[in-house]
Every structure is written in C-alpha cells, then in structure tokens.
C-alpha cells in the first residue's frame, strides 16, 4: 500500500481522484470505481502497489503489438483491479476480484524484482497489461524508471481511460501502447463498460501527439459493435488520427457476463479487415484466429509480404532496417 498520486483533498475528508477519467469523489473509508484506491481519513491510498496478481513472459505479439520489436519477448505484469466493468471481460477473474475480496490478492514484487525478471529472460519490453495498468500507475511508474535505466522499453495495454494529467507523467517513461477501442457508441460504453467513449478517443489522439507508438484493438462482439457502419466509423477514426496505426480486430468468445452471444464469425473479421484497408489503414490484423493468413504484415506500398505469422509466432521477417526489402518503403513501427 502506498499513498496515491493524482488526487486532491476536499472538505469533510473527502478526496477527488485524478488518475482516470472517472474522477471519482471518494468519501472516507470508501474506494473508487476501480476498487483499489481507498480514502483513509482524507488520504488516498493505492492498495495494489507492488501487489502483483499475474506476471510472466509473453511474445510481444500477444499484447497485441505487431509493429513493435516483432519476435521479441515482453515481461508482463498486472495487479488486481480495473476502472471498467466490461460485461465480456476476458480477464474478469483478476480484474474484478477487488469488488468481492476483502484482501487484495497477489504476491509482493518490488520494481527491482520486475526489472530483474525481465533482464533474466532477455525481455526487450515490460508490459503493464492483463487488467488495467492505469489503476496501478504508482507502481508502474517506479518500474518504468528502472526499466529505462536498464535499456528496457515500457508498454501499456490499456482501455484508454487514463487522465490527461496521469498520461503526461507516464509518457516520460512510456514507449508504446495498445488501446482497446471497444465500440464507437457512447451508449455501448455506458451500458457494457460503465464508462464513456469520448475520453478513450481523446487518449488515442493524445498518444499520437506524444509520439508514443500506438496500436489499437477492437474485440468484435456480435450484436454489440459488429455492424459494417460501426466498424467503418472505428476504422475511419483511427485513420484520421494516423493511417500508420495498426488496427487489431479480434474474435470474441463468450466470457464473464456475456455468455449468450456466439463467437464472432470469421467472415465478419475478414470484412472488418477489408473495411480498415478501404478506410486507408496500412496495417490491419485479425486476432484469435491463427492460421487464417490475415495476421501477416504487408508493405503498404508494394504489397509484398514482410512478416509471416502463425498466431504469435513469426515464421519469416523480411523487414530490413525498418524498410521493405522489396521497394524500400519505411515500415511504420519500431524494428
């Protein structure tokens, strides 16, 4: 436990949290929406500092980040907690635990422990992922600082609800991110996630302004966000921010409190990819359907195959010094 950053004290020992775009006002003895920031006698505390619920070595492609150091491994960490309540959450068993648990689950790790583990496994990045890294920003920041001293890059896999104030601080040590753009309807965000759309769009724009490498993921959920109209709006928005931003469109599987919808039909993902390309995006990837051929990286200029993948595994990489081997076009990303 550690005193939180990004909050202000109010009258009657209340506090207002500035970490994310919920901007919770929290009474003494209560917690914010994330359930891991608690007001104790007028002081806001992070209950998850150094309390890691999941850690391990993943291919960077699993984040998913396909245009960032492809073929390398990332040491991934998470604490319990999330500031969203997504009905189809794929990691609900660790993200929603604090809502019901009296004690915060996990095991203790110091920032030094995390960086040591990353170096021992020759990881080029540390990913703050699995749950929502914004809710453990204090711990993440301390890890990030040490990571940079060790030549390791930092990656956020986020729902994009980080406040501008917090992101400005994080951006000093952050190298890249993948943001979930779950839908393009505010009503969907409110009903399905307990949040709003516009702050997520603002965060995506802000990553671009801060010159952080960014990739965007949309889990395509039947009956929720799978119409051609909405998929085109998502792709068009991303293209307006930057045609170089890779868009990952992933297959949904029934999870958590959204068990009645079927898995996303593969043909819907194929069509979503076509829409992304029609809207001008250079890199559109289909996820959760390995072997279908649409997880490869192609040159946006000459259309040559550059990186051949099967799932998270790279079969062949023909990018040379960040350029297409065939026509010499600069390929967007970090290589």
Image (cartoon, rainbow, N blue to C red):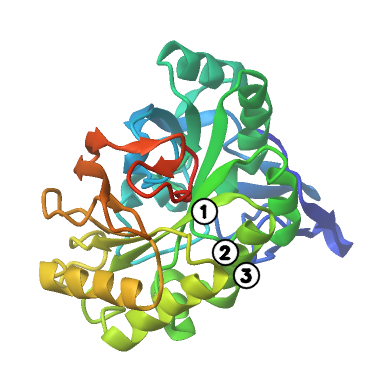
**Dot 1 surroundings within 10 Å: few (below 14), some, or many (20 or more)?**
many
Q: Are marks 2 and 1 in contact (CB under 8 Å)?
A: yes
- At label 2, counting other C-alpha atoms closer than 10 Å, the crowd grade (few under 14, some 14-19, many 20 or more) is many
Circles 2, 3 touching at the beta carbon (< 8 Å): yes
Q: Position of residue 282 (x, y in %)?
A: 39, 63
Q: Quadrant of residue 276?
A: bottom left
* Mark number displayed over residue 202: 3
Distance from Cα at disc 2 to Cα at disc 3: 5 Å
Secondary structure under tag 3 reads: helix
Q: Secondary structure at mark 1?
A: strand
The answer to which image quadrant residue 19 occupies is bottom right
Q: Is residue 202 left or right of residue 92?
A: right
Q: Which mark is residue 235?
A: none
Q: Which residue position is annotated with label 2?
A: 204
Quadrant where the N terminus sits is top right
- Residue placed furthest toward the bottom: 229
Q: On the image, numbered disc 1 is attached to which residue?
A: 214
Q: Report if residue 289 is visible in the image.
A: yes
């Amino acid at each position: 436990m550690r005193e939180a950053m990004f909050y202000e004290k109010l009258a009657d020992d209340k506090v207002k949290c500035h970490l994310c775009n919920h901007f919770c006002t929290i009474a003494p003895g209560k917690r914010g929406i994330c359930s891991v920031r608690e007001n104790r006698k007028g002081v806001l505390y992070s209950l998850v500092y150094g309390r890691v619920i999941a850690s391990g070595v993943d291919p960077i492609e699993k984040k998913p980040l396909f245009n960032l150091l492809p073929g390398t491994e990332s040491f991934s960490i998470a604490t319990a907690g999330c500031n969203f309540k997504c009905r189809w959450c794929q990691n609900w068993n660790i993200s929603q635990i604090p809502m019901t648990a009296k004690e915060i689950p996990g095991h203790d790790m110091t920032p030094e422990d995390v960086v040591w583990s990353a170096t021992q496994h020759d990881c080029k990045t540390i990913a703050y992922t699995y749950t929502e890294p914004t809710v453990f920003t204090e711990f993440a920041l301390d890890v990030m600082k040490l990571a940079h001293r060790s030549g390791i890059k930092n990656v956020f896999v986020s729902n994009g609800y980080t406040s501008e104030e917090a992101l400005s601080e994080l951006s000093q040590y952050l190298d890249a991110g993948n943001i979930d753009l779950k839908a393009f309807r505010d009503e969907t965000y409110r009903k399905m996630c307990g949040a709003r759309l516009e702050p997520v769009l603002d965060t995506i724009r802000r990553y671009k302004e801060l010159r952080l490498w960014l990739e965007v993921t949309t889990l395509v959920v039947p009956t929720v966000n799978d119409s051609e109209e909405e998929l085109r709006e998502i792709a068009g928005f991303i293209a307006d921010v930057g045609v170089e931003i890779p868009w990952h469109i992933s297959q949904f599987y029934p999870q958590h409190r959204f068990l009645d919808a079927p898995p996303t039909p593969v043909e819907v993902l194929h069509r979503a990819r076509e829409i992304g390309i029609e809207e001008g995006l250079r890199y559109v990837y289909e996820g959760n359907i390995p072997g279908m051929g649409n997880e490869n990286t192609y040159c946006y200029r000459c259309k040559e195959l550059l990186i051949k993948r099967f799932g998270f595994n790279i079969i062949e990489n023909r990018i040379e010094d960040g350029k297409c081997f065939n026509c010499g076009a600069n390929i967007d990303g970090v290589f």
